[in-house]
Amino acid sequence: MRKIHDISLTIGPDLPTWPSDPSVHIERVSKIEEGANANVSKVEMGLHTGTHLDAPYHFLPDGARLESLALDVLIGPAQVVEVPEQFAEINAEVLRQVSLAKGVQRVLFKTRNSHFWAEGERAFRPDFVGITQDGAEYLVEQGVRLVGIDYLSVAPYKRSRPTHEVLLRAGVVILEGLDLSQVGPGLYHLICLPIKFQGVEGGPARAILVEESAGV
């Protein structure tokens, strides 16, 4: 027996987006009720909308593009780490307290951000919890290859570049915009695949966690 947790955000016009990013617009351009052969829709949005991956090119001018991300990093054992709600950011000291599993390569952080999704928050929240530069350096030192978080950026608001650069220069894949509100801490099997856009710095993804009865 296994349980599958969908940890992706549903993309729609009410979904919060980064302040400088395009909002979501979905339009049905062919309609059966108007005589069309089939229903067809189009979508306009930024590539960092909802649950999405950051490729190195997002912050590194010569970095790898989205289609170059190694699939083996995006599929495999992962640890969901619950960060106590009193912490406003995830720094190296916090990471020393939360007990990362030995040898873990994929870490998803569940913070107080998850309440935003559970409560249906429609406005962007600049007070979200993010990972600081020294926290990113700690994760790289531990050999982590994928870092996920339950809001639209892995880094604290207005401090995006240092954290992103540390992780992306080290080849760490960044997974942002996770909905971990219904997932408890522990070990799972992560499957997370982005849409294969060519030559871009990031893209939306469907992410799931598989909970095996006998572990991962």
Image: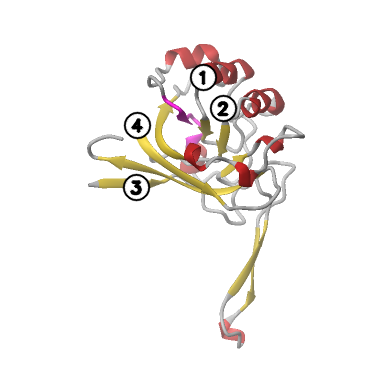
Q: Does the magenta stretch include residue 136?
A: no
Name the spot of residue 67 as percent of width and height, x first.
62, 47
Name the spot of residue 63 as percent of width and height, x first.
70, 35
- Disc 3 residue type? Ile
Q: Name the residue under label 1.
A: 87
Front: mark 1 or 4: 4
Of labels 3 and 1, earlier in sequence is: 3
Answer whether labels 1 and 2 touch (C-beta < 8 Å): yes
- Disc 4 residue type? Leu
Name the spot of residue 24 as percent of width and height, x first.
65, 55
Of labels 4 and 2, earlier in sequence is: 2
Q: Is residue 138 left or right of residue 81?
A: right
* 68 versus 159 height, above or below: below
Q: Give the SS element for disc 3.
A: strand
Q: Give the SS element for disc 4.
A: strand
Q: Name the residue under label 2.
A: 129
The structure's colour scheme is secondary structure
Q: Mark 3 points at which residue?
A: 4
- Disc 2 residue type? Val
Of labels 3 and 4, earlier in sequence is: 3
Distance from disc 3 to disc 4, alpha carbons, whole Å, reads 13 Å
Distance from disc 2 to disc 3, alpha carbons, whole Å, reads 26 Å
Determine the residue located farthest toward the bottom in the rendered image. Answer: 35
Magenta residues, as a range? 104-114
* Residue at the spot 23% in from the left edge and 36% down from the top edge: 214
Task: Give the quarter of the figure containing the C terminus.
Answer: top left
Front: mark 4 or 2: 4
Q: In this view, does 63 lie to the left or right of 185?
A: right
Location of residue 128 by image quarter: top right
Nearest the camera: 117 or 153? 153
